[in-house]
Amino acid sequence: MTAGSRTAAPTAQTGAPRRGGTVWLGTGVILLALNLRPALVAVSPLAPTIKAASGMSSAELSLLTSLPLLCFGLLAPLAPRAGRRWGLERTLLGSMAFVLGGTALRLVAAEWALFGGSVLVGAGIAVANVLLPALIKRDFAGRTGLMTGLYSMSLFGGAALAAGVTVPVGTAAGLDWRTTLACWGFLAAVAIAVWAPRARAAGPVPRTGARAVRGLWSSPLAWAVTLYMGLQSLNYYAAAAWLPTVLESAGMDAGQAGWMLSLSSLLGITGSFLAPVVSGRRLGAGAIAVLGAVLCGAGFAGLLAAPVGGAYLWMVLLGLGQGAAISLALLFIVQRAPDARIASQLSSNAQGFGYVLAAFGPAVLGASHDATGSWTLPLVLLAAALLPQALCGALASRDRLVAERPRIRPQGE
């Protein structure tokens, strides 16, 4: 496939909401997005408690974060197929059922259930990760910047909730760590209740929806989008998995360390909303991608120099930088695809390869800490990964399409 023209020709799409239903559909998208981080991020502030209760090593504990990321990557290619077969709405409803089931399984007092629940959560999030950008491309074609900003803002909002309230709420309610983790299933239940009417009302899947896209792996632009997604995900998840532990090892108490991660996520809300809205108006997307990497680099450098004394400033820098990065990664998927079908496949490619790459982040950081007994090397590795991230962001920001006339084939071919 070759790069296409700068402007995609409009295509007829099914399922576009009427004006009266746009706000309700947008609310549903936000609720779905709110569920894509809490069940995963909630492990981080509870990591010291889980480690003490289970006797896991740092590398073993990192699997609770890495396993869902592997699901994001390995199961992403299945999401477009599921969407073509059952429709975006029904498939997204099923993804929330997986998240709810995974959080409930963590209640079982067995190590296999803890890891099994993480796999189920990862499977549900993997599908929603891929299909929500396609839904935005299809139903909000004229508001992609705004909806991508709201979507990515919701991702960070969910992460902020999980990082900030998991330990305090569990402590105040007298809950053990398993029950505390499982409580995040309530948010998935709310999303299911709101999204179910939309799924029931969805019409039959059009015949064109059963056709698969191929050839994106030959597009350099698609590779730039894919690598940017993977590198910024590696940066975010590796930092989120170990940031509270880094701060605790420097002398900060567990509650405040969890609040620091929450503060970073709260600032990420601002960065994730502003980046796609401002992009193309005041700053180019490439410049924002480089700026986001610089902010994260400054935050990691600060954690090396004064982890506790300057913690608030480092969290501000990391939050703004990481928020801008994830929002741009999602925006690139939507903007570089000419229609929703190709957006779904590009999202699958980017998140499939990208999250497999990202899954190594928490494990590598945990292993390097175990090997050196210090957090210096892990933070240096995170900072070094920002260089290729900035380069890929600049390449992905080019105002072109990944395909002008995509080749299609029947699903079973």
Image (spheres, rainbow, N blue to C red):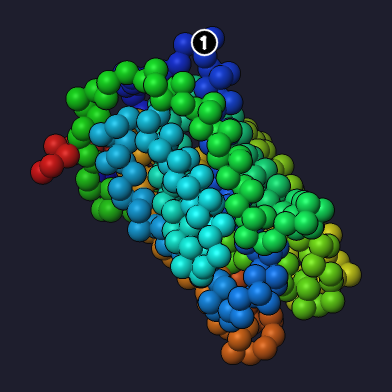
Look at 52% across and 14% down and name the residue there.
21
Look at 58% across and 18% down and name the residue there.
23
Look at 84% across and 69% down and name the residue there.
253
Picture coordinates of residue 367, whole percent (x, y): 55, 82
Q: Residue furthest left?
A: 413
Look at 83% across and 62% down and name the residue there.
256
- Of 150 and 99, which appears nearest the observer? 99
Quarter of the picture containing the C terminus is top left
Give the labeled residue for mark 1: 19
Instruction: Using the image, determine if residue 58 lies above or below residue 208.
Output: below
Picture coordinates of residue 66, whole percent (x, y): 50, 66
Quarter of the picture containing the N terminus is top left
- Of 205 and 345, which appears nearest the observer? 205
Instruction: Using the image, determine if residue 17 lies above or below residue 151.
Output: above
Residue 138 picture quarter: top left
Question: From this viewpoint, is residue 47 visible?
Answer: yes
Name the kind of residue labelled 1 in the image: Arg
